[in-house]
Image: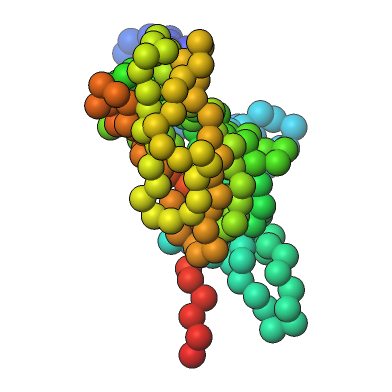
Amino acid sequence: MQANQVAVIQNFYLSIPKPMSHFRKSLYVLSGLAGILAISWFVRQEATKNPELPRNSAKSSTREPGGSFREARLAAAAQQASVSSNGNTQPSDSAIEMARAAGVPATVGKSGLWAGVMPSDAASGGSKAFAVARAGASRADLRTDQNGMFQRMHSATGQRIEFQVSYPGMKSTEWVDVGILDGGTLEPTGPLKPDKNGHISFVFHTGPSDGSYRISLTTSDHDTKMLDIWAGRPEWEERLTAN
């Protein structure tokens, strides 16, 4: 109860004549309290009916695109590459909405290159390294986590990707051995010498199959980093199966 309402009740109680019985005093106080509560209820009801009065509508106006549950959002994303009976391959409205909310392009896995948010550099294992990947007009900036893993990239199958990996402070006498673990092709092969800025550069082509293509980077002082490219249909989408 607000302070001004309490003061009104107290003043009302003191204004009652002294000779009046205790029962009648209590009756007057209860009547006054009921009147104040009725007025407060009426004001709140009018506020909810009047659209010009301010009210908190944030809760009712926000919702999670694609549904309130993770399964619903994954189901919306799974429609992205599904082929309908008439051969239409355009993403559905729900898939585009989910992709926009998650920051994922609707064309991910079909063309270009995309990578998620870089991990925090608060904990970085081994030698510090940064990478830039380019595929056509698209670019991804990469940084390792505490396990030496760069954040996952998504690209199309058969995609040509140019990499530049930077090792700050690497000497010209050191080298980086670049190897592929899951197929694809690499140019050039063998250990790579850094330039004066500690950069190494190479080109990688993803293979024809959907899935993960990993590239290992091992320096001459045995520090290992890993690049991970998911090619083709994104891993959160359901695979199309034949009956």
Residue 65 x/y as whole percent: 57, 51
Q: Which is nearer the eye, 233 or 79?
A: 233
Q: Is residue 39 above or below residue 243?
A: above
- Which quarter of the figure has residue 2? top left
Residue 191 in the image, given as x and y percentages of width and height: 39, 32
Residue 135: x and y in percent read 65, 41
Q: Is residue 183 visible?
A: yes
How did the renderer colour the structure? rainbow
Rendered-image quadrant of the N terminus: top left
Residue depicted at x 48% and y 54%: 184
Count of numbered circles on the image: 0
Name above or below for residue 26 compared with residue 44: above
Question: Is 176 displayed left or right of 100 in the figure?
Answer: left
- The residue at 68%/64% (across/down) is 92
Most extreme residue toward the bottom, as rendered? 243
Closer to us: 88 or 32: 88
Q: Quadrant of residue 110?
A: bottom right
Residue 217: which quarter of the image?
top left
Q: Could you tell me if residue 35 is visible in this image? A: no
Q: Residue at x 66, y 52 (%)?
A: 111
- Left or right: residue 22 compared with residue 92: left
What is the x, y in percent for residue 69?
44, 56
| Residue at 50% over, 45% down | 186
Q: Is residue 184 left or right of residue 96?
A: left
Most foreground residue, 113 or 56:
113
